[in-house]
Amino acid sequence: MQRRYVGAFAALAAALWGGLLFPSPPPCPDEEVSRLSADFQQALPQELTISCRGQLLRDRDTFFWSLFTDHFGSNPNTPYMWMALPAFGFLLPSPMWHVQPQDAVVLLARRPPEVEYFSFTSFALWVPRRGLQFSSLGDSVNNLNLKETQDHIFAHVLTASNRTFTLVEEALVKSGLPKSAINLAVIPSDVGGLFQDWTHFETVLRLFRFRDQAKGDAYLQSHYPVVYLKGSHGDSTMLPTRPYKDRAHVSNGHERMLEQDFMKHNSQMLANVGSDFGRDFGDAKPLRFTPLMIQGLECLRHNTECLGDCPDAAYYGPNVHEDSDGVDMLKLSSDDELHVVSLVNHRHLNISVYGNLAVLRSWKPTLSKTRMSIRATSLGVTSFEFPEERFISWAFTRNPAHCHHLRDSVHGCSLLDAHVSRESFLTYCERIYLNPVTGTGPNWSDLLPAHLFHLRPASAPRVASPTARVASVPPLPLRVFDGTQALQFSHVVKTGGESLELYLGALSEPGAPRLDYGPCRRAAAAHAPGNLAEAARKASGCEAAAGVVSFALCGLNCECCASDLSGAFRGVLLRSPRAHALSVFTHCHGAHHNSWGRILEDVPQYLAEGILRATEMSCGSYCTSFAEDWEANLGEQLLAERQDVSPVRVIPWARNMQSHALTCSVANGSLGQHFRTLSERVDVEEALESLQQFHWVGLTDLMEQSVCLLHFQHNGTLPAACDCRSEADALRIPRFAHGVQQRDPETLPEDLLRQLDEFTAVDARLFAKALRLLLGRLRFVELQTGAQLLPCLPWRRLWRSTRYVPGLWAAPEVLAE
């Protein structure tokens, strides 16, 4: 036993000694560079000795240090590499290392495969007595100024010593590399007292967009050799500090002359966005981005932090003021607001080779320009994603519906929730890289920076629609109650019933509409299994489980078969078929691919979903497959629908589920709206007839207008916010997402959309009828009250999201008769 422990300890010690204490970099696969490295090391004079060896390594592949790759405002979707040397000369690879005045760090490598932009930038990263300064030491070595051979091989030398550089240069030339391929980065000896403070340095390689990704991936694993050379020559002559190049140049492009055109673009963009929301954003004021003029040498001189400044870039952001150290952060906390950033496409105008707009986050409401503490996110947009247009607009929001609405009004839309929590503060950074004329950062005075618009659709004035749209809607009479009748609501799953319940539950004024759950509970009790033991004894475990689930969901959530309910004031919410089917499927997929965050956010929902998953197992029928990718999963499920022979279909989202909910009856042998047997068929005429039995019919697609109609039918009055001419805030109807991301049907391939439409053809006819009912009844309310309800409908958005419904539209935004 004792020998076993001694042997294990010896093996561990050997592993530590050979791997941790003296790690050996993997060999470089580039044979020509490897030969050059070997020849260079042989050619070194006695005054230079190799202290340790390292490699050019991708940041995310570096043990421990990969944890910090997004912590310093890094660019979105951009690979970074750094010269990694053993920490303290003998530990695991580290991107930062201390350099003595007579020492040097040398990289031998080949030019990266074709990219839009790359640069090597050296930094004074960490100064023990002053903290994380992260300040550049001078201009970058980039794709426009790199010195290299005809075979694209080069050396990068970082040192402060004149004599050391001379010796390194001689050794490189002796090994076969010409002087014209040697790039020097100087450590300033007269700025910031870097050698007195035991400063740790870093050299970072930024790589933006490989033309050939396979070659790019190989380069990221190239392991080009890095050596730390210790100088012992005793010569204290230092290299002069190199100032940054002047960014001004007679041949520079100038964007300022485009300012009027940029303002016109913004006005048109706001008009288009307003049309999508039925709101007037003409008074929205831009928050103009201003330059954050940080340069590493200045940060070192004034003992401030630069957060990894790139000399090849110009930085801009909101709330950056020349005469103030504070930078106020932004916040986007609710689903009722969004940011739209308009910016110049600098790359299209040949002012820069690359640019991006990045989202940054912080827990502090105000940042310091000189002591900045901010974190990057992976969210952002790059100039490679821009169309070939002079001006670009991009929306940022927490509400997926906004991205759906704005598809034709902005060039893109990004969701924040997965990247910035609602409690966090955020800001944006516009980064503009490399003037192709000067080979350095663009000149600030030549640039036209971005504008940010903070839009709140709910509180913006309404916009009236053209008369032709309203005139195409004939009025339909409706029944108005006296305010004493509660709504007997038939809750079709995933049509917004929870949102309606939350909205009505929050109303405190006397006589406000309310829900009556009594009919649902009576229906559940009337058709409940005698007891669980009796249900368990049924021949089919599937039917027993389905019966128990339907009993519970009908009694607790009014998710009953509509035919089993009755009442004096009946109502239902429906939804456009593509949106409904995809919403149910997405919820199913989310329930089968849970996260701890989603579980803890709503534990009762998780338990209910667990019961449904158990029912799926009992029936051998699943509403989703187990593929992680939701779109691939959707395709698999639609294919499986054609082959499914399960006697009971659980959550039949692709089988006209809304029409099924309106026509099924537990009293007549159905298992409930969440289940469908092979023998059940949905008849379109029966579904349309069932729809006519409801006094109130609302649509999730027009939720605000539907609720306005509910108010009127309840007691003959309208909230002030329902009138298009009113300046009152819009009705605040909560959004209930069940912890899953809303998906936009328009993003799906045409073949999947065709299949969805085929499977939901009855629901499409049901929706068309429901929409005409809703619009006709709203028109009737207008004639009765003098209020304007239809002119501020989001007609453009409605048409765009439902134009696939057969026979619904005669022309864009004009209903068919």
Image (cartoon, rainbow, N blue to C red):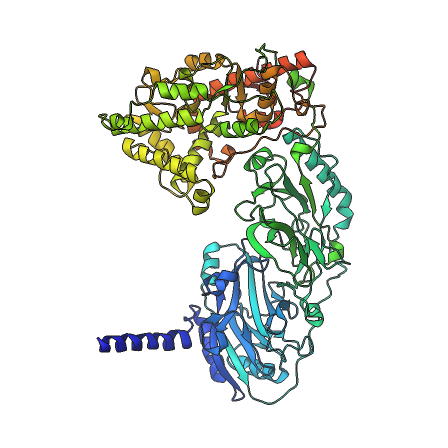
Image-quadrant location for residue 557:
top left
Left or right: 180 with respect to 744? right
Image-quadrant location for residue 752:
top left
Left or right: 605 with respect to 283? left
* Residue 102 coordinates in the image, percent (x, y): 59, 83
* Residue 527 coordinates in the image, percent (x, y): 34, 19
Left or right: 190 with respect to 605? right
* Residue 157 coordinates in the image, percent (x, y): 57, 75
The residue depicted at 66 percent of the width and 80 percent of the height is 239
Q: Nearer the viewer, residue 637 or 210?
A: 637
User: Is residue 192 depicted above or below 490 in this figure?
Assistant: below
- Quick one: which residue is furthest to the front in this view? 510
Q: Nearer the viewer, residue 608 or 156?
A: 608
User: Is residue 405 depicted above or below 763 in this figure?
Assistant: below
The residue depicted at 72 percent of the width and 23 percent of the height is 725
* Residue 217 coordinates in the image, percent (x, y): 46, 58
Q: Nearer the viewer, residue 462 or 165?
A: 462
Can residue 598 be seen here? The reply is yes
- The tally of labels here is 0
User: Is residue 489 depicted above or below 147 in this figure?
Assistant: above
Quarter that holds the N terminus: bottom left
